[in-house]
Amino acid sequence: MKARDLTDLAIRNLREAILRNALTTLGVAVGVASLVAMLSLGVGLQQLASKRLSQSGLFDTIFVTPKNSFRGMGRPQPRDVESDKPPRPLDEDVRREFEKLPNVIEVYPQIRFFTEVRFDNKPYSTVVAGMPESSRNSGAFDGMQGNFFSSPSANEAILQMEFAKDLSDQPPSLVGRDVVLRYAERQASAGAGADPFSGGGFSVVPKELKLKIIGIVETEPAAGYGGYGNARLLIPLQTATTLRAAQVNDLRDIVRGDSSDKLSYSSLSVRAKSPSQVEALEASIKKMGFNAFSLLDASKSLRTFFSVFDLLLGIFGSLALAVATLGIINTLVMAILERRREIGVLKALGAADSDVQQLFFVEAGVMGLLGGVFGVTFGWLLGRAITFGTNVYLKRQSLNPIDLSSVPWWLVITALIFAVLVSLGAGLYPASRAAKLNPVDALRYE
Amino acid sequence: MPETPPAVQLQNISRHYQMGQTRVRAVDDVSLTVGSGEFLALLGSSGSGKSTLLNLMAGLDRPTSGSIVADGANLAQLSSLELARYRRNTVGMIFQSFNLLPRMTLEENVELPLRLAEVDRSERPARVREALERVRLTHRIGHRPSELSGGEQQRVAIARALVNRPRILLADEPTGNLDSTTGETILNLLREVQSHLGMTIVMVTHERFLAERFADRLATMGDGKLLSTSSAPKVVAQ
């Protein structure tokens, strides 16, 4: 029999015992809904964690330092044995080379320094960090109070919430007020040329810069690996660069006497398009003769954790679906008993065993598909309801709302395919039983 | 002129069942030839084995031994798929209790064999109409079987049996559930089909009078054996 005729007959048969079949389909729907709701929570939590981690820049960023870096934590740096050349400094040329590497979004220097901030004539020690313009859209500042920097070179500051609490009991009232940044500017010493970063030594001159507080952010978005500690006052990267603030490696360069003629950075952050590309990128950078670090292994462990977590949720979610398959088997076995004579007639008219088998299969498949469609819808609604409930709770706790559940397309399609396959599996026994019915006995059946 | 091969040829056919400790010989060593275009009536009392023999000819059952040659093939040796194809294309069946599917309209009931034979959808309405015209029921095409009288239901069953244009029509007590007048109408219709379409008809009945009146030949069975075959004396209805 052709597929269209089979489907037509199957739907007609399902409509015949509409209440029983609807209840069976509802059972499948509940099973699929529980599966989808569980997995949507798993996926949602994974996305939430990934988002937070990607905002932290931990997993898509490679931190590059020169081979002679201070950052080796006392470990002897592997020298370039084959060529006894001095290690390359991280200068602007290198930064551009990194930018040209495949799958690199951006490369920016890490500028962080300990300094003092004056607010209401009181001194506060803190770490200042330069934020690249790209962080505006990275989601790192989602939910912040106030605004992001008005321009890449604005004399503006965003405070980290804990620091803001140090400054005032009413952190939101700080937005719009000024703080004074006191820092050590690196200036060329007399006779050493105009460029303070050229060799020959430099002077450190105390300077001040007035910054307008324009926003407060809950967590420090730049707490990436390789920082000198949590930065609590964030300024635009360009502003930070123009300050020429003395950094930790300056003294080391002087002591080692290998400060080059050009501006060099203590470290560069190379951001990859996705964490999956970090490994290859890190290898390329190492080949170029630099130290490169990333937290790739941690990212892998996290993915493994969520895979296992999703699997467990899937197993629990599937339990209801397993019960629903028993419902399908029961319904179809009942249908065989009721339609015994009809099966006999079909066979007398020329239906092959396979036609009868396929008819019952399609009936099971249609129940599975309908159950799947309703189940995905219920599951999505259930996920939304859980998210809504959670957000009501979070709001009461004065916390930001989160998107707890997520139903991506792959989950919808997988759930539908799974529902149909499970239903077909459930139809296996009844279909083969119907196909094996002896037509003479079936026709005699009253 | 070459001789037309028989429509069905049964050679030493037996069909035995095991019921507990007892072996039931439903059909026992029956040999019978049904000529092409012949109207054969199988007579016998209840349990004589006539319906079993008809089921064997229909390919619904397999003999314990012997051969049934129809359409050039020995049904005893066909696979179940080939038997299904034989039932679909070579034979049409009608039953005592009509066996129409109650939730389908007449049109859908008659269309069913065409679905099974995978006849093109565009071709089906004309074929259904043609079959229903032959039994003079086109005006009830959208009705369900429950809205029809017994005679009309049997006419629909005949239309369904004819729609795939088989060469053999097998009728199992077609008048058993009908009053005598309606029964006669049905048999007149079968006779008409036989003469107009040149079909071979094998009818199981226990109504000797009707069989003698409408069939070409009578085969009488008893206790699973073929007791006699004879040409039917044409009885003219009063």
Image (spheres, helix red, strand yellow):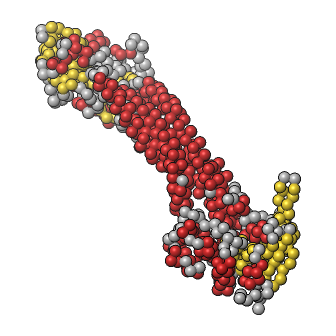
Q: Return the residue found at the far top.
A: A122
Q: What quarter of the picture does the N terminus of chain B occupy?
A: bottom right
- Give the image location of residue A371, x and y in percent: 49, 46
Q: Residue at x 83, y 76 (%)?
A: B220
- Give the image location of residue A180, x and y in percent: 14, 15
Residue B159 shows in this picture = yes
Q: What quarter of the picture does the C terminus of chain B occupy?
A: bottom right
* On screen, residue A151 above or below B188: above
Q: Residue at x 12, y 18 (%)?
A: A178
Q: Return the residue found at the far bottom.
A: B1
Q: How many marks?
A: 0
Q: Residue at x 48, y 49 (%)?
A: A370
- Give the image location of residue A357, x and y in percent: 63, 56
Residue A347: image quadrant is bottom right
Residue B76 shows in this picture = no
* On screen, residue A373 above or below A249: below
A372, A219: nearer the viewer:
A372
A334, B127: nearer the viewer:
A334
Left or right: where does residue B207 sit relative to residue A2?
A: right
Left or right: where does residue B84 sit relative to residue A415?
A: right
